[in-house]
């Protein structure tokens, strides 16, 4: 019986260790890192990237779905700290992926800007601009820039000009637009956002709980067999 208890105790320690490791993975190494998911659709295609009925790699047609995600450092310093109505944050974006139809473009850390404008007289704006995109050529043109801009002319959305740690509500803005720009002049695909939500961290916690449950089930089965 003592041997059985030792085996059960060893398995319990292993379960706790595995669960702790997964839970540690669920906690960001840098609490300032924030991730947003977004979706949208294509409403307009201009220049050489247009192809009637195109699905992405062969050119873009209208009404294609768009989706993506990006991670940024919400602790990025504001280069205009004395201006409480305009927050300007250089190079906060750590990664981004955008999919339009069956076409995907990605961003590596490089040139990016996030702006939060809080101005009761002129309106509120949330804008993200990224350069240094990479992806396959579309009709011989390469992706260069991605932009996302939300505008509310009433200026009643933000309480300050800090980077948001939760996504701004799209319903609070009179207009929103995204655009993926390609090399040359006037080559872009663009449209409106349909959702902007935080990347759920609960997936990792669910995984940790699942591992623990499976381990506990195995322990019970072993106990019955060895007793």
Image (spheres, rainbow, N blue to C red):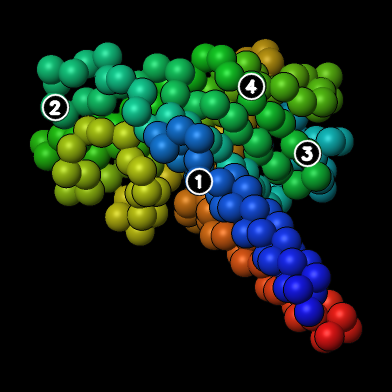
175 left or right, relative to 99? left
Q: How crowded is mark 1: few (under 14 residues within 10 Å), some or many (20 or more)?
A: few
Q: Which mark is residue 208?
A: none
Query: Mark 1 vs mark 2: which is more N-terminal?
Result: 1
State the residue position of label 4.
Answer: 108
Quadrant of residue 170 within the rendered picture = bottom left
| Cα gap from disc 2 to disc 4, whole angstroms | 30 Å
Residue 157 higher or lower than 181, as above or below: below
Residue at image position (56%, 46%) is: 24
Is any atom of residue 124 visible in this view? Answer: yes
89 left or right, relative to 58? left
Residue 188 spot, x, y in % from top left:
64, 29
State the residue position of label 2.
Answer: 84
**Secondary structure found at label 4:** loop
Quadrant in which the N terminus appears: bottom right
Residue 79 higher or lower than 73, as above or below: above
Residue at image position (50%, 26%) is: 93
| Cα gap from disc 3 to disc 4, whole angstroms | 17 Å
Query: Mark 1 vs mark 4: which is more N-terminal?
Result: 1
Residue 63 spot, x, y in % from top left:
67, 53
Residue 9 higher or lower than 225, as above or below: above
**Secondary structure found at label 3:** strand
- Nearer the camera: disc 1 or disc 2: 1
Q: How crowded is mark 2: few (under 14 residues within 10 Å), some or many (20 or more)?
A: few
Quadrant of residue 104 within the rendered picture = top right
């Amino acid at each position: 019986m003592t041997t059985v208890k030792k085996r059960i105790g060893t398995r319990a320690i292993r379960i706790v260790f595995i669960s702790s490791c997964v839970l540690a993975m669920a906690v960001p190494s840098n609490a300032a890192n924030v991730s947003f998911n977004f979706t949208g659709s294509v409403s307009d295609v201009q220049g050489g990237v247009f192809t009637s009925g195109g699905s992405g790699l062969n050119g873009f047609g209208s009404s294609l779905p768009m989706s993506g995600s990006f991670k940024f450092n919400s602790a990025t310093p504001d280069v205009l700290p004395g201006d409480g109505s305009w927050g300007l944050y250089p190079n906060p974006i750590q990664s981004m992926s955008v999919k339009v139809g069956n076409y995907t473009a990605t961003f590596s850390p490089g040139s990016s800007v996030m702006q939060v404008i809080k101005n009761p007289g002129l309106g509120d704006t949330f804008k993200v601009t990224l350069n240094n995109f990479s992806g396959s050529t579309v009709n011989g043109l390469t992706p260069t820039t991605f932009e996302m801009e939300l505008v509310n002319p009433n200026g009643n959305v933000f309480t300050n000009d800090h980077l948001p740690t939760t996504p701004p509500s799209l319903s609070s803005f009179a207009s929103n637009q995204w655009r993926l720009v390609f090399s040359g002049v006037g080559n872009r695909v663009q449209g409106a956002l349909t959702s902007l939500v935080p990347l759920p961290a609960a997936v990792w916690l669910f995984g940790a709980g699942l591992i623990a449950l499976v381990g506990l089930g195995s322990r019970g089965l072993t106990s019955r067999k060895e007793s």
